[in-house]
Amino acid sequence: MGAAAGAADRKPVKSPFPPLHSLWMYTMNRCTKSRARSAFSAFLAGLFLTFAVTASAQGIQRDAPKDVVLGKLVVTAPPEITLDGKPDRLSPGSRIRDLNNMLVLSGGIVGKTLPVVYRRDAAGLIHEVWILTDDEYTKLGGAGSGANGAQRFIELLALIFGARR
């Protein structure tokens, strides 16, 4: 009887080590409050960054291109093109932009005659092309003549690309 009374009087010994959470012993993972808070804050941060990037992307403005030439483009067999009836070639990595400043694949406009302004690269190949509307093309058509023709051409380009925003 003395042994049973002695066992009841003993207090459990506390370990100096923190309790070990073993995934082998405790196979059911619990979502603790600290984990839930950190997951929720990470979700909110990701949501905030998504909206911040989306809002900043809407602020992109299309500026009028500089050093461009007006012409009529027909893509015959990419990268072969004709500009104003003369055979020419697109450069590797050339960019063709539509009215919304979106990239257009040259294969998608084969055989179409498009009014454009374009820029050449250092090798003389057509590197950047901006597609215009017929109204924009007619406005720019007479801008190159006269003493201030180049300045007027640049001003009209700024007006056209400013109106597309």
Image (cartoon, rainbow, N blue to C red):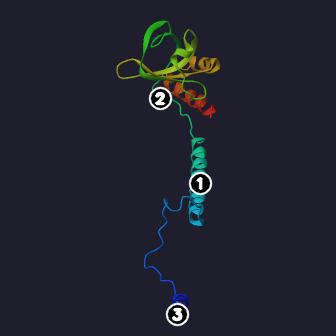
Q: Residue at x 50, y 9 (%)?
A: 84
Query: Picture quarter containing residue 157?
Result: top right
Is there any visible trace of residue 145 in the rendered image?
A: no
Q: Which numbered disc flags the more N-terminal residue, 1 or 3?
A: 3
Residue 2: mark: 3
* Dot 3: element: helix
Badge 1: residue crowd in 10 Å (few <14, some 14–19, many ≥20): few
| Residue 43 or residue 152, whichever sits in front | 43
Which residue corresponds to mark 1? 43
Nearer-N-terminus badge (3/2):
3
In the rendering, at what x and y percent does residue 62 appear? 55, 34
Disc nearest the viewer among 2 and 1: 1
Give the alpha-carbon distance from disc 1 to disc 3, as whole Å.
Answer: 61 Å
* Image quadrant assignment for residue 162: top right
Place of residue 134 in the rendered image (x, y in percent of width and height, measured from the top left): 63, 17
- Residue 116, image x and y in percent? 54, 19
The answer to whether the residue labelled 1 contacts the one labelled 3, judged by CB atoms less than 8 Å apart, is no
Dot 2 or dot 1: first in sequence order is 1
Do the residues bearing badges 2 and 1 touch, measured as CB atoms within 8 Å? no
In this view, 4 is above or below 19? below
Q: Residue furthest left?
A: 123
In the figure, 8 relative to 72: above or below?
Answer: below
Please name which of the two marks, 1 or 3, marks the residue nearer to the observer. Answer: 3
Q: Label 1 amino acid?
A: Phe
The residue closer to the viewer here, 31 or 163, is 31
